[in-house]
Image (cartoon, rainbow, N blue to C red):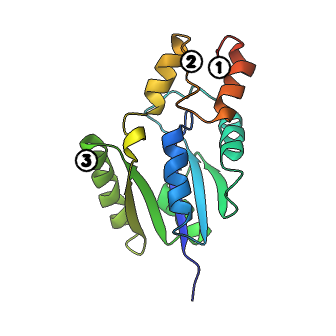
């Protein structure tokens, strides 16, 4: 029997407690779950790739079957094939996410019909969390510690020194 290998991708700018919740839940479904830090051409990144990787690694250190990968010049289907992924994992917070993810799933399926996609609905406590809202709060020097892992708060303190805890 072959391993069940999942791929959960995002820009994670920054990773939120909602992301961590989805990753923890997905990790129970797979022998190996890759968390892919992907560049989003439509977004300007707040954190460097190196900082994102460090924050994500610290937030997920307790998950033995989770590995981090980085891609900036490949489609997710190409990365998935290279890693032997069997299933994409996507999170849904609301109907807008469903619309976006449905369109993404269409093209992923067109490009790689052998790969399946599962959708996990956000835990209600995290349905309103988004990295863009967190970045907005950071820009206005608000405390984001209840929305992000400790590794993000630590990185913010290192970069800006003003973020309260």
Whether pointer 1 and pointer 3 mark residues with C-beta atoms closer than 8 Å, the reply is no
Task: Name the residue that disc number 2 marks.
Answer: 143
- Up-down: is 125 above or below 144? below
143 relative position to 55: left or right: left
Q: Which residue is mark 3?
A: 99
What residue appears at the point 28 percent right and 49 percent down from the top-left corner? 98
Element at badge 3? helix
- Relative height, residue 8 to residue 19 (above, below): below
Residue 48 visible in this rendered orientation of the protein: no
Q: CA distance from mark 2 to mark 1?
A: 6 Å
Do labels 2 and 1 touch, CB within 8 Å?
A: yes
Image spot of residue 149 (x, y percent) = 62, 36
Quarter of the figure with residue 145:
top right
On the image, the x and y values in percent for residue 128 come to 37, 34
Which one is in front in this view, the residue at disc 2 or the one at disc 3?
A: 2
Q: Earlier in the sequence, mark 2 or mark 1?
A: 2
Number of residues whose C-alpha sits closer than 10 Å to that of mark 1, classed few (under 14), some (14–19) or many (20 or more): few
Q: Mark 2 to mark 3: distance in Å?
A: 31 Å
Residue beneath disc 1: 165
Q: Mark yes or no: residue 115 visible.
A: yes
Which corner quadrant of the image does residue 27 belong to? bottom right
**Residue 165, percent from left and from top:** 65, 19
Looking at the rendering, in which quadrant would you find the N terminus?
A: bottom right
Quick one: SS at disc 1? loop
Q: Earlier in the sequence, mark 1 or mark 3?
A: 3
């Amino acid at each position: 029997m072959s391993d069940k290998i999942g791929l959960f991708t995002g820009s994670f700018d920054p990773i939120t407690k909602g992301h961590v919740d989805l990753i923890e839940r997905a990790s129970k479904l797979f022998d190996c779950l890759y968390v892919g830090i992907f560049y989003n051409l439509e977004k300007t990144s707040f954190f460097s790739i190196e900082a994102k990787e460090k924050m994500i690694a610290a937030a997920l250190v307790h998950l033995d079957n989770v590995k981090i990968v980085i891609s900036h010049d490949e489609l997710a289907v190409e990365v998935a094939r290279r890693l032997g992924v069997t299933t994409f994992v996507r999170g849904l917070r609301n109907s807008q996410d469903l619309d976006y993810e449905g369109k993404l799933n269409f093209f992923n399926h067109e490009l790689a019909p052998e790969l399946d996609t599962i959708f996990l609905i956000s835990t209600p406590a995290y349905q309103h969390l988004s990295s863009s809202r967190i970045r907005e709060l950071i820009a206005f020097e608000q405390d984001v510690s209840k929305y992000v892992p400790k590794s993000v708060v630590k990185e913010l303190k290192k970069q800006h020194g003003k973020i309260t805890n």
